[in-house]
Image (cartoon, rainbow, N blue to C red):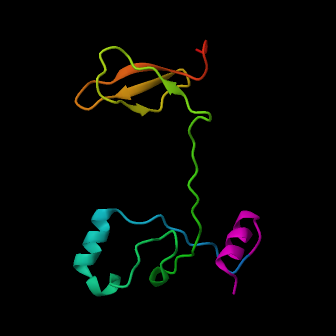
């Protein structure tokens, strides 16, 4: 019998194996609550962390590494006029980023990576 890692490597290298990896991301919160109500004894021992595997479902274990997909180095934000609270930057094009304020319509602010850029 192959280990979870061996099975995963076999799959990624298009090699034959005893079976393919069984990975799931999880369930919607509403689904988990419904399962707890409808069959509490069936889900009583579950960890609900499906990245690390769930033995009752036969899920394979796997590692998760968070990856940052933002700009490196990060852009500096210039706030538009009439901004008094701190904005929450929302990803946009490399030249612009939308700034969202609580209770206000979004405004557009320029994001500069270096002086003279854009």
Q: Quick check: is 28 in the magenta stretch?
A: no
Task: Report the number of discs.
Answer: 0
Residue 114: give x, y in percent of width and height.
Answer: 61, 20
Q: Quadrant of residue 29?
A: bottom left
Q: Quadrant where the N terminus lies? A: bottom right
Nearer the observer, 80 or 107 = 80
Q: Quadrant of residue 108?
A: top left
Query: Which residue is drawn at the image coordinates 38% and 65% (left, top)?
Result: 27
Q: Which residues are magenta?
A: 1-16
Query: Which residue is drawn at the image coordinates 75% and 65% (left, top)?
Result: 14
Does residue 74 appear to the left or right of 99 in the view shown? right
Q: Tell me if residue 69 comes above or below residue 110 in the rendering.
A: below
Q: Tell me if residue 35 comes above or below residue 71 in the rendering.
A: below
Q: Tell me if residue 109 comes above or below residue 61 in the rendering.
A: above
Query: Which residue is drawn at the image coordinates 52% and 26% (left, top)?
Result: 76
Residue 106: give x, y in percent of width and height.
Answer: 32, 24
Nearer the observer, 93 or 87 = 87
Does residue 32 appear to the left or right of 110 in the view shown? left
Does residue 100 appear to the left or right of 61 in the view shown? left
Nearer the observer, 67 or 31 = 67
Residue 91: give x, y in percent of width and height.
Answer: 47, 32
Residue 78: give x, y in percent of width and height.
Answer: 45, 20
Q: Quadrant where the C terminus lies? A: top right
Q: Quick check: is 15 in the magenta stretch?
A: yes
Query: Which residue is drawn at the image coordinates 34% and 82% (left, top)?
Result: 43
């Amino acid at each position: 019998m192959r280990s979870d890692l061996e099975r995963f490597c076999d799959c990624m290298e298009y090699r034959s194996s005893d079976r393919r990896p069984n990975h799931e991301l999880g369930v919607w919160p509403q689904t988990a609550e419904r399962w707890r109500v409808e069959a509490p004894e069936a889900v009583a021992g579950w960890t609900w962390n499906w990245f690390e595997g769930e033995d009752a479902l036969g899920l394979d274990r796997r590692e998760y590494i968070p990856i940052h997909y933002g700009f490196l180095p990060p852009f500096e934000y210039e706030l538009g006029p009439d901004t008094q609270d701190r904005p929450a930057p929302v990803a946009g094009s490399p030249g612009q980023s939308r700034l969202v304020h609580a209770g206000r319509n979004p405004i557009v602010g320029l994001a500069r990576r270096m002086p003279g850029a854009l």
